[in-house]
């Protein structure tokens, strides 16, 4: 795999969330709590915290 492809893979993150006051359409005024899968893309300006990497830095410090 080329370096450019690896960068692209690292750019996209899937995150499972538990969201309240929602519905299956994604309304902010829903009446239930649902598990959803959200996609974050750094190229779109989304920020994603890599907790595992932060934990390694804290141990090394």
Image (tube, rainbow, N blue to C red):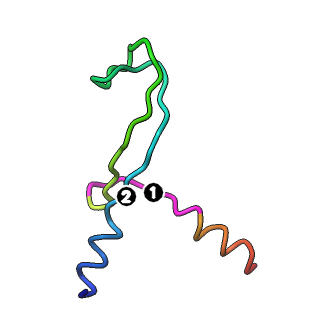
The circle drawn on residue 13 is: 2
Image location of residue 59, percent across then percent down: 75, 75
The x, y position of residue 6, in whole percent, is 30, 79
SS class, disc 1 = loop
Closer to the camera: disc 2 or disc 1?
2
In this rendering, the answer to whether 46 lies above or below 37 is: below
Seen at 37% across and 53% down, the residue is 14
Q: Is residue 50 magenta?
A: yes
Q: Which residues are magenta?
A: 44-51
Closer to the camera, 19 or 11?
Answer: 19
> Taking 37 as reference, is 43 left or right?
left
Residue 3's place in the image compared with 23, above or below, is below
Question: Neighbour class for label 1 at 10 Å: few (<14), some, many (≥20)?
Answer: few
Residue 1, compared with residue 30, is above or below; it is: below
Task: Please provide percent x and percent y for residue 27.
Answer: 33, 20
Front residue (pair 18, 50): 18
Q: Name the side, left or right, on which 1 lies relative to 38.
A: left
Along the viewing direction, whichever of 34 and 49 lies nearer the viewer: 34
Count of marks placed on residues: 2
Report which residue position mark 1 lands on.
48
């Amino acid at each position: 795999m080329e370096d450019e492809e690896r960068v692209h893979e690292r750019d996209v993150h899937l995150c499972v969330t538990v969201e309240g006051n929602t519905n299956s359409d994604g309304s902010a005024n829903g009446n239930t709590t649902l598990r959803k899968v959200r996609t974050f893309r750094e190229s779109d300006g989304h920020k994603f915290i890599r907790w595992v990497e932060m934990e390694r830095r804290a141990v090394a410090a």
